[in-house]
Image: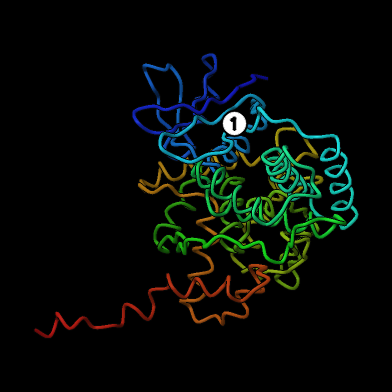
Amino acid sequence: MITIVPEIIQHKGKQVLLLRFPYDQPLINLIKHVPGAQWSRTQKAWYFLYTEDILKEVKQLFKEIAIIDCTTTTLNQKENLPGKVLRIKDYRLSEESKTLLNKYKSWLRSRRYSENTIDTYIDALTTFLKFNSAKPVSEITNEDVIDFNNNYILANNYSASFQNQVVNAIKLFFKTVQHTNINAELIHRPKRAKQLPNVLSKEEVKQILDAPRFLKHKAMLSLVYSCGLRCGELLRLKPEHIDSKRNLLIIKQSKGRKDRIAPLSDKTIQLLRDYYKAFKPIVYLFEGENTGTPYTQRSLQNVLKQCILKAGINKPVTLHWLRHSYATHLLEGGTDLRYIQEILGHSSSRTTEIYTHVSTKSIQKIISPFDSL
């Protein structure tokens, strides 16, 4: 497996993430899935505008085909920006911090947090403690959190979502550590941009779902849309999760470790029956090359990309767009928001309400005063 060491450099006046690796066609095909991917002739490498989100996306996308080694990846100092620390790798954790991080990890596991959440919190907290490595953990104050936000997160143009993850990790950590000078309740969260979900029209969805050449690919994409599934939820499905007698799909341990159900239409059930007869999956409903192993996220992303190209849709469609489209189309079809919330597995109704802002059912009925002039 190829090891890639990302570089963060100034290129064409912008801070970019640079990936250098020997010629490898599968890797090249994969890297083109990353939004904004470009080839630099001068650097002889692929690059993207740098954000914390893009680095995470690259690590997730490449995890089964290459090792992304970020241990020596550093951020360049930006001109005219105040900064206490931008090169976190130059700072070492104290023995006290290492001990507390291990205790924190054990505490998170005892509370049954998911491994992904644990990894995210530990990485975020490690960065924060390194930033404040000059003082004992017991002496860190709320002013140090503000300093970290201004001189690390904002100075490096990290996203509000990344800052929010760090805040979550810090607040939870200092609630479990005794005898500190920090008040976790006073740590403020960033104001997050209110972005609308990306939604496809029904005609565009149909074009995508009609595009696959293979029954398996059609069944997978159709199930994502017809039940509003997240990618991971689809790949974890097992044959026993299909309740065809009650027209239900049982989704086990989804986000937040919650089980839920989603309605299955007769059309979807028939498609799944045809698929099951043809492939006879053993463990997972959609298995990979080896029997008993789940289909990979990377492979499914490749399938979607080919379908988008075949359908002639010039939009950066992701699998999550199908989930957003499903929810919006339900709302436009008259389904109550409370039911949509249950089907999607949202903890808060406020999350589901965002689809009211992209539904065109009522907006299209509005007559512009321009028409009456």
Which residue: 56% across, 35% down?
Answer: 86
Give whichever of 43, 63 is nearer the camera: 43
The type of colouring in the image is rainbow
- Label 1 crowding class (10 Å Cα cut-off): few <14, some 14-19, many 20+? some
- The residue lying at 74 percent from left, 62 percent from top is 183
**Secondary structure beneath label 1:** loop
Q: Outermost residue toward the left? A: 373
Kindly identify which residue carries mark 1: 87
Total tally of numbered discs in the picture: 1
Type of amino acid at the residue the image marks with label 1: Arg
Which quadrant of the rendered structure holds the N terminus?
top right
Query: Where residue 53 appears, x then y in whole percent?
Result: 55, 44
Q: Is residue 15 left or right of residue 256?
A: left
Q: Quadrant of the C terminus?
A: bottom left
Q: Is residue 108 above or below residue 289?
A: below
x and y percentages locating residue 311 in the rendered image: 39, 47
Left or right for 103, reference 62: right
Q: Residue at x 65, y 63 (%)?
A: 269
Splitting the image into 4 quarters, where does residue 96 fall?
Answer: top right
Left or right side of 200 for 297: right
